[in-house]
Amino acid sequence: MSIISTLQTSLRAMRANKVRTGLTVLGMVIGIAAIIIVFSAGEGINSLIKSEIESFGGSDMIETEIKVPSSKKGGASEAQSGVNLVLGVQVTTLSLDDMDDINKLPNIKRSYAGVMGQEQVSYASELKKAVLFGTSADFIDIDKSEMERGRFFNKEEDKSLEQVAVLGYKIKDKLFGDSDPIGQYIKIRKKKFRVIGTLEKRGAVMNFDFDDFVYVPIRTLQKKIMGINHILFMMHQVNDTGLIDETAEEIRYILRQNHNIEQPTEKRRGWSDTGKDDFRVISMVESMEVLKTATNAITILLLAIVAISLVVGGVGIMNIMYVIVNERTREIGLRKAVGAKYSDILKQFLTESILITAIGGVIGVILGVLVSYLIKIGAARAGLDWIFSVPLRAFVVALGFSFVFGILFGVYPARKAAKMDPIEALRSE
């Protein structure tokens, strides 16, 4: 029997039982669509993470932040350090003097430091709670924030503890509405701060709503508002990204020296940590790689779950094929009696199984792409930088699964049909 004749026979058999064929295809459609959605969502999450990290400055950045020391070496204490910080453990060893020393490194272009606090901010009769972000003058040259009006404070104003402020988009609107805030005075803890600039709308990044920030010189916030000397983090911009790992290691060396921490005797890669370090140094490239690895792991886990549903759908196809073989026993006996070979019968029923999974695969791919696009639209309306992308490997895996499952779960019923004795088959009722 030719391939065309086999296909025609299989299609006729499928049309004769449209409801049963449709329900069998449905199980495969759902599984294949899920594969496309998982891959597309993985791409979207990776793009979202990348854009969030790049909003802090891009791939030419190194971040230094506080960390609770531990007696354990390596990265074993990372989670515990985060828990300790959440529970209120304070690390006060990181300072502006550290940043001054780091800025002397040849590959460091510029840096800014950061301290945060929450205070009531008032203007006239308006009183609002806002995040105070004390930072360095170089912040505006490194960060992705853009000035809307006025200017950012300079190094001289920071060093002389000037009481000046730059307002984020939302807090400006809350306090001043449509009126011009430039040159006006706001009050923070009964201290007057002159507004010298406003920032363009930026939105939330990593759960921080920068539009609700009041930006003030870091030394002013430290000395006049919070009464502290330490900082929470620093961001360093490098000249040569090719030397970013070496520069990160140089920063660790300086900080250990400044904080009287013993230098490690063995060389480590990545987030090298002596265990006693009260800081963490990581490049934005490392952050993206780590987060991408985590996203890929989640994608693989979801695909494993989807594979289970596909196996269930495949078992359903096998059961249906067994039912079809039993229903068409007399037909099989008649065809074998008039000369049909073992291979002809095997080919026919195997073709039906592959057709069912192929149709399910194609419809599943179309449905998956459509749902993925709808997810992108929903994410965009929620303000997320989510791209619509379905990688080529998603189509390969999806269609590959449907083809393999068609053969795998169709071969046993097909063999059963092909092995039937024609006389016994013709006797069946």
Image (cartoon, grey):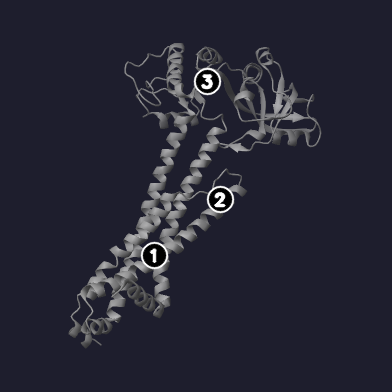
Which tag, 2 or 3, sits closer to the chain's start?
3
Eyeballing the image, is 45 above or below 247? below
Type of residue at label 2? Lys
Seen in the image, is 32 located left or right of residue 1?
Answer: right
- Residue 106 x, y percent position in the rendering: 50, 14
Quadrant in which the N terminus is drawn: bottom left
Q: Residue at 42% of width from left, 15% of height from top?
A: 253
From the image, tell me which residue sits under label 2: 376
What amino acid is labelled 3 in the image? Asn
Q: Residue under circle 1?
A: 358
- Circle on res. 239: 3
Quarter of the picture containing the C terminus is bottom left
Q: Nearer the viewer, residue 180 or 118?
A: 180
Q: Quadrant of residue 416?
A: bottom left
The one nearer the camera, 56 or 370, is 370
Please identify the quarter of the rendering in which residue 422 is found: bottom left
Q: Which one is in front in this view, the residue at disc 2 or the one at disc 3?
A: 3
Q: Does dot 1 land on a helix, a strand or a loop?
A: helix
SS for callout 3: loop
